[in-house]
Image: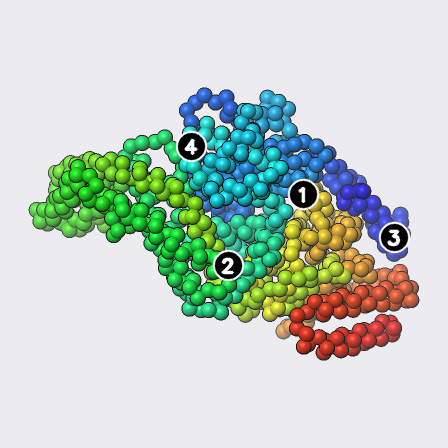
Amino acid sequence: MSSPSSQVSSRTTGPLSSYFSSSIPPNSPGYQLGTSSSQAISHILRNKDIPSSRYSPSIASSRPSTPYRTTSTTTSRPTTPSRRFRSEATPSILGQNDSRDVVCAVSEARGVTPTVGIAAVDLSLGEVTLSQICDNQSYVRTIHKLQLACPSRIVFMPSACSPNERSTFFSLVQRLIPEAEMSSHDRSAWSESAGIEYIERLAPEGDIGAIKVAIQGKYYAICCFSAAMKYIDRQFNLSFSPQSLRIRYQPSEGTMMIDISAMQSLEVMRNIKSAKSKECLFGLLNHTLTPMGSRVLRNNMLQPPTDFDGFIKTRYDALEEMVTNEEMFHEIRKALKLFHDAEKTLTKLVIIRNVTGVSAVEEQLNHILMIKSFLESVPDLYRALHPAKSDLLVKIRNLCQPEKTVPILLNIKRVIESDVTYMKSPLDLRNQRAFAVKSGISGMLDVARQTYRELTEAIHAYSDHINEQYRVAASLKFDNRRLYWFRIPTVDLDKDIIRQVFINVIPKKNYMECQTLNLVKLNQRLLDTSNEIVMRSDAAIRDLVKELRRQVSPLFRICESIALVDMISSFGQITTTRDYVRPNIEDTLALKSARHPILDKKMASEYIPNDYYSAEQHRFHCVTGCNMSGKSTYIRSVALLQIMAQIGCFVPAEFASFPIIHNIFARISTQDSIEANLSSFGVEMREMAFILKNIDNKSLAIIDELGRGTSTRDGMAIAMAISEALLDTGASIWFATHFVELARVFADRIGVLNLHLASNTSVGEGGLPQLTMLYKADSGTVDDESHYGIALARAIGMPQSFINCAETVANDLRKRRESNRQSSDAYKEIHRRRLALNLYEAINQAKKSSNKETISGYLKRLREQYMSRLQEIEEM
């Protein structure tokens, strides 16, 4: 069976050549393909051996590839997995991503259809994702999975990289994920038995059985997990406490694959013009109140689920209950505001580092206080969910039951004072840590606390003394670096006093920051006392941490539940404010008065909604129209609404029905000006080759103005050839073009629906031409018989002789086109067949309808429309 790209090249000489030969002489120089363009097309679409045609680079980067490092022979001391690679949340095509350290281990079994194992260990969230992908020679799904994981390091087997010959897979990863550091680890680390041992030791006891069932036969994924854990242990000197690591197997077929270039051009995660702008789909939907909820929303938008009964339907039910029960919805939102990022806190608690000292004990104290605050906030959410009846909200409520959280909270309160909580202010947090452990546990600890209290009072008394002695209005401040210091207004302040009394002076606009020698001495005594308190608390804190590590599994489940309810409540926020509707999931895409979600919020009532329909008999939508008529907005809306529907959100429309889509592709130009150079055209062809190689009948593709990067004749030829190939895939295609002839050629093909964005031409005041865009989609192609250009030329005042000549030429060209159309009988027969197929499809849709009361009236109207349309065909 020939590949899609070869089918494209073969079809180019079929209907395409017959179309041109019917109206233009074969040897006409105006319609012969240019040598350079045709060679470029042939090279890109046909040649499968060059790397550029194997996979479309999703992230254009001028940055050189990350140099490869072999860490298996490194003898330097272990490094920390921290901020060398992801020092901050950097904006990318995948959106604003919080700082995370992810180590991925990958291995492949080479063959005709290579199998690739992936183990992604998130050191920031204490989560492991295992996958084993049966990929093609382009490694499309594997590369996509790695890009979504945002790894800081990718670990390979030594045989895949230097000093051995670098594998094709290694070269692709190095080129397409340049921000990750490439490393290798010893061959002995890739062990299936060691991977199973890690799972049995680190996974929660209740999850081990399910994990083993899921990974049965997944040899490469298990080996990758073993290598990743040994790499982390050796390179970072980190380990996890037993039964504390969340491990899950994620099959690649359970989620939608959205091509990275589609995410960029559709502005799914980030606005193209400004990385900080919220005018993107993620910015529109992200009304989450916790970092955990924001992460879950982001993960779902990157990989929307395809399981309707298991995920999508339950989310619809939960969201519908929220928006109909306003009181419960507001109580849930109120309760969510109390939560910190407990997921990261729990991960830091279960990671075992060989670090001791005051800072380590202080960090553990902070974690305990944050977990205590988290557990004290869970009952509020439990009470808010009390009226819930939908399955998902009831399940979340059961996970938040007091029986699950109160015992853990009581364990903490046996060691920690009940009124102590986590504070964000440095001074408040220091005081909370000092008095966190209950009195009576250690006599020396109580003595140190009394000293701490007396020193604090002495510092405040000294501040009052400074104000009285020097008649200044000094306010006492605190930070972790300087400890206590003074802020003194500089108005009427004697400069001699500044030089004689104050040190460490930092001048500001209207005040100065400073200390005195006595204050520095008091600070040092206070610091020594604080450190003594921390060290005296160490034994009690260590015992409590060990106890919490054994109980961390249910806490992680509660975190995941809170994140999910936060995401759904975020959907509820946008649904109630923008009047969205619940979609139906069926085999047909049908939208009534649908709106582009981002522009709908920006333009409000000014936005003009449109209808959409896509089914087996109308799967290729050829959209024509003038410039700025709204073609791109029209076709982009379909993809964005499809993503919203599959993550469980309601959509902006009066009625919505969606099929389950497994892949979304897009080829959209991000500029309005025509790009005539070969390099931009080459990128366009390379991306189309990627789409043709991976698209199937469960895909949705958005193609905007294909072929405009080259000459008109070549662009027309390529657009027709690629349209032919896309039509044969059975995918839902939304194809916007200025090539009206393309729409006419495909008008009689089964599965093609021609649409156009309407506009009106008129003459305004002073005789100036006006072109009014209606932004409304209608059937058929754009009307080029009205000769908009000639009408505008007449309105401007061009000579009448010029106008007459232009009209004569335009009418002559139109008559030539019509003379080459098919015979009247054949033309009528084609339309009769299409009408019968449309009737058959409409009856099937009516058969699936749940509203039996309206079927009778619908069928009567359907019969009347059929007879009316049939009569129109006979009168042609």
Find residue 238 and name its label.
4
Quote the CA–CA distance across marks 1 and 2. 45 Å
Along the viewing direction, whichever of 790 and 64 lies nearer the viewer: 64
Quote the CA–CA distance across marks 2 and 3. 58 Å
Relative horizontal placement of residue 110, taking residue 721 as reference (left or right): left
Residue topped by disc 3: 18
Which of disc 2 and disc 1 is earlier in sequence? Answer: 2
Can you tell which of label 2 and label 4 is closer to the viewer? 2
Can you tell which of label 2 and label 3 is closer to the viewer? 2
Quote the CA–CA distance across marks 3 and 1. 29 Å
Can you tell which of label 4 and label 1 is closer to the viewer? 4
Confirm or deny contact between disc 4 and disc 1 (CB under 8 A).
Answer: no
Residue topped by disc 1: 683
Please, what is the three-letter code of the amino acid marked with disc 4?
Leu
* Dot 3 crowding, Cα within 10 Å, few <14, some 14–19, many 20+: few
Can you tell which of label 1 and label 2 is closer to the viewer? 2
Give the secondary structure at mark 3. Answer: helix
Confirm or deny contact between disc 1 and disc 2 (CB under 8 A).
Answer: no
